[in-house]
Image (cartoon, rainbow, N blue to C red):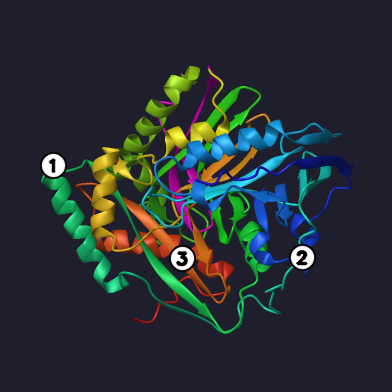
């Protein structure tokens, strides 16, 4: 077996002027496949180019996280780092995304950009990273188009929308038979374009409409996730769990939710009340919170788990959400914690091994890196890792993109309602592509 040669990286972070839009800094001539992003409400990180990447031989299988973490430790040990800013996200960083399943051929891995621009709390910086042993890399051909939305059509993916309720009904039957308590099933839709899709344009649209989520890009996986799998910063561990979803009414929520006898017009029902009172939604959420708490407890000296969830409001949906936090009790890095948490009940089910087998049997597709961890890690092991939701995977030629959406299935799930939930969740990437959220895909 050939031992991969480790890069000898030199990283330097310097203070820079704050930017109204970090995406403005991405040069138009760079290969958009190398663009990385982790941005929320105008703060975060955007990078481009490629100084190093974990070898392809390390990217798949059940050991994909451990191999990537070992590679990163060795890279950090041999690197020279000058950090004149000293904030989270400065210095030497790697961005990563990993496949949901260890059996996926798209295993994922870690990527070190050549340039990273970041900003937070009124301060901004730029980090340049070079491999001392490598020749300068060509910029490659840019696939940026004049308009990210030109000539894009949707078609069915592995399972057509009209066939999805039958898949859900099959899953409910398996739950009622006692095979699992919950399973999360996802479907895909394929967007096809007349010319290459503009990565940066997608990111701008997502960051603008879904500012409260983390807008991410790693190796062609692009999306806006509302779910923080784990954040490790200065010994503090945090996680946000989402499970339970209802469509959001586009008009303002009413202050009165029942018809008043003295009023002529009735008030519309508030969908948030459904989330906080519906047994199915609360059961699904409880499974997800319990799985995260069980995975984090061995790594935390203390862990605070709220007794009740709150309602997270996004442009298209409401989610039940719970924020967990604790003090780190060992030397696990953020990537180690992400590996320990994956797959949570929010994206797999309960029990996880049985749910994963059912997913492989029923979905009829390879998820790739959808629903896997996505984020970044620094030289000290701190970092942010979300779950790759509300996302799509660009094809190598950038002329097509697989869009994904799923939902948690329990015994009380209604197949038609679960189809509707996936359509709502697909709205984020349809918006990014400039398509109406209700635009139905054509058949295969």
Q: What span is colored magenta in the figure?
A: 305-329
2 or 1: mark nearer the eye: 2
3D distance between C-alphas at marks 1 and 3: 31 Å
Tag 2 residue: 138
Left/right of residue 297 with respect to residue 218 in the rendered view:
left
Q: Is residue 138 visible?
A: yes
Tag 3 residue: 403
Tag 1 residue: 178
Q: Is residue 327 magenta?
A: yes
Residue at image position (79%, 48%) is: 130
For disc 3, the neighbor class at 10 Å (few under 14, some 14 to 19, many from 20) is many
Residue 203 position, x and y percent, is 64, 61
Residue 209 position by quadrant? bottom right
Residue at image position (51%, 59%) is: 391
| Nearer to me, 24 or 307 | 24
Residue at image position (39%, 50%) is: 245
189 vs 343: above or below: below
Left/right of residue 334 with respect to residue 45 in the rendered view:
left
Residue 408 position, x and y percent, is 32, 49
152 vs 180: above or below: below
For disc 1, the neighbor class at 10 Å (few under 14, some 14 to 19, many from 20) is few
């Amino acid at each position: 077996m050939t031992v991969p040669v480790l890069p000898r990286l030199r990283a330097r972070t310097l203070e820079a002027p704050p930017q109204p839009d970090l995406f403005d800094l991405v040069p138009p001539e760079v290969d958009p496949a190398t663009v990385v992003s982790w941005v929320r409400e105008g703060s975060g990180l955007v990078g481009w180019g490629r100084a190093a990447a974990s070898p392809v031989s390390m990217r798949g299988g059940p050991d994909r996280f451990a191999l990537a973490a070992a590679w990163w430790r060795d890279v950090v040990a041999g690197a020279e780092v000058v950090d004149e800013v000293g904030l989270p996200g400065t210095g030497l960083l790697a961005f990563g995304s990993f496949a949901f399943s260890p059996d996926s051929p798209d295993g994922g891995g870690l990527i070190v950009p050549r340039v990273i621009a970041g900003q937070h709390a009124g301060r901004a910086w730029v980090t340049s990273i070079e491999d001392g042993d490598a020749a300068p890399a060509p910029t490659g051909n840019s696939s940026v188009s004049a308009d990210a939305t030109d000539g894009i059509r949707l078609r069915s993916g592995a399972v057509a929308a009209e066939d999805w309720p039958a898949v859900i009904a099959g899953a409910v039957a398996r739950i009622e038979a006692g095979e699992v308590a919950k399973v999360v099933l996802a479907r895909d839709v394929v967007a096809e374009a007349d010319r290459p899709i503009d990565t940066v344009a997608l990111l701008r649209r997502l960051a603008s409409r879904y500012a409260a989520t983390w807008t991410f890009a790693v190796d062609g996986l692009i999306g806006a996730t509302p779910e923080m799998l784990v954040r490790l910063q200065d010994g503090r561990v945090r996680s946000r769990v989402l499970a339970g979803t209802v469509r959001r009414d586009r008009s303002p929520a009413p202050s009165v939710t029942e018809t008043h006898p003295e009023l002529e017009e009735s008030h519309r029902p508030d969908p948030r009340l459904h989330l906080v009172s519906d047994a199915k939604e609360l059961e699904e959420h409880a499974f997800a919170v319990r799985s995260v708490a069980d995975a984090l407890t061995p790594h935390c000296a203390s862990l605070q788990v709220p007794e009740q969830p709150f309602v997270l409001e996004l442009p298209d949906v409401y989610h039940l959400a719970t924020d967990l936090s604790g003090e780190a009790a060992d030397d696990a890095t953020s990537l180690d914690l992400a590996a320990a948490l994956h797959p949570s009940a929010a994206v797999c089910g309960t029990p996880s091994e049985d749910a994963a087998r059912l997913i492989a049997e029923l979905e009829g597709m390879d998820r790739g890196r959808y629903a896997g961890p996505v984020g970044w890690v620094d030289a000290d092991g701190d970092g942010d890792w979300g779950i790759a939701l509300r996302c799509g995977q660009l094809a190598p030629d950038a002329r097509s993109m697989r869009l994904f959406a799923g939902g948690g299935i329990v015994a009380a799930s209604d197949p038609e309602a679960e189809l509707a939930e996936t359509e709502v969740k697909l709205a984020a990437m349809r918006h990014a592509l400039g398509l109406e959220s209700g635009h139905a895909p054509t058949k295969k």
